[in-house]
Amino acid sequence: MSKFANFLRKPRNFAAVAVASAGVAFTFKAAPHLFPNHIYRPLFEAYKTGKPYKVTPEQQQEFQQACDDLNVDSSKFSTFVTSRWEVKSVGLPWFPAGCHTGIPASMVAEPELNNLRFSGPLKANLDSREGMWLKDSMKLSPAARRFAMARQIALNDSNLTFYPIVLAPITTLTGFATTFVVHAVAPVAPIFVTGLGIGTCFYFAYSFVLGSVNERIDLKVNQRLAAISDEYKMGGLEFYEKLLQKNRALRSLLGKRGEQLYTYYGNETPGLVYSTGATNIQKRDVLKEMVEAAEKERRAKEMVESTS
């Protein structure tokens, strides 16, 4: 440790370690987007009897319609059926592997929910009140399904997923630079102690900033989709209403585990300083306000036309 500390005292060596650490952070964040076939899809693709589920013609048609509504080239996207609850996509259109979007097997007009299972040995009792809530929450209208797909398409197409990727290495480099400056100006503690303290502060700062960035991205994408048509506004409102309903049902069905994952109102439980973005209630309320504003505008227009 003492030899490594002496090694770090030279600015050139310290800079090399900082750049290497930033490179590791960037690689960790960017790898799923650069190599989705080898990292993302094997983990989240849904299988049955050893073979992956196939995307249904209905799902592919709805995905294509969402791309057309956003004026996005669908050839840059590859779809597959995921075992996750929600639509999830990784990659960027200008990356060699393109974008890979996972569509839940239940996201069809008539989802098969009788054999619904969770990770671990637990099997949900779908005949209970909470089970009925869960089954109802999985049945989405075509507009709500297209909204869920279009949301991920818009995220990838607008390169908004690139910001979290570059935030990690930037924070790492800034933390190393701050450590070196503080240790050079006031060497009151060994460089490892100084680095540990400053690193902890920057980790919390990174978590807070990442949550803020995700929140801004969530609301920006939803506003873009709501601007397409009233159908997307209504579909988005339904999607988040059903998402909140699903989370409340899972909170009850999963017992203590569900209470750890979801709040009483149906939001995902945030970390101490980290959040995955805007809460489900935030996103629902923004769309609800847009729907109400569009309805008021329509009524005002009808009154003007009737009086004229």
Image (cartoon, helix red, strand yellow):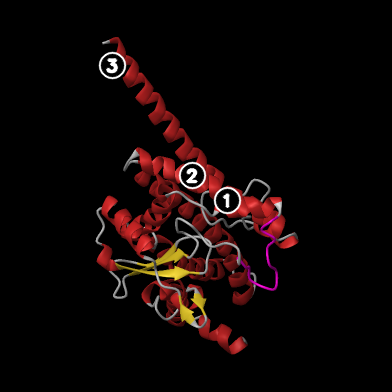
The kind of residue tagged 2 is: Glu
For the residue labelled by badge 2, is the local secondary structure a helix, a strand or a loop? helix
Comes first in the chain, label 3 or label 1: 1
- Per the rendered image, the range of residues in magenta is 116-127
Residue at (39, 61) in percent of width and height = 161
Say which residue label 1 marks.
136
The kind of residue tagged 3 is: Glu
In magenta stretch: residue 67:
no
- Residue 267 appears in the picture as rendered: no
The kind of residue tagged 1 is: Asp
Residue 193 horizontal side relative to residue 296, left or right: right
Q: CA distance from mark 3 to mark 2?
A: 30 Å
Tell me where residue 299 appears, x and y as whole percent: 38, 22
In the rendered view, tell whether residue 73 sits above or below residue 119: above
Say which residue label 3 marks.
305
Quarter of the view holding residue 53: bottom left
Badge count: 3
Tell me where residue 285 appears, x and y as whole percent: 51, 38
Q: Are marks 2 and 1 in contact (CB under 8 Å)?
A: no
Q: Are marks 3 and 2 in contact (CB under 8 Å)?
A: no
Q: Residues within 10 Å of mark 2 (few under 14, many from 20)?
A: many
Residue 238's tag is: 2
Placement of the N terminus among the 4 image quadrants:
bottom right
Comes first in the chain, label 3 or label 2: 2
In magenta stretch: residue 121:
yes
Residue located farthest toward the bottom when viewing the structure as drawn? 3
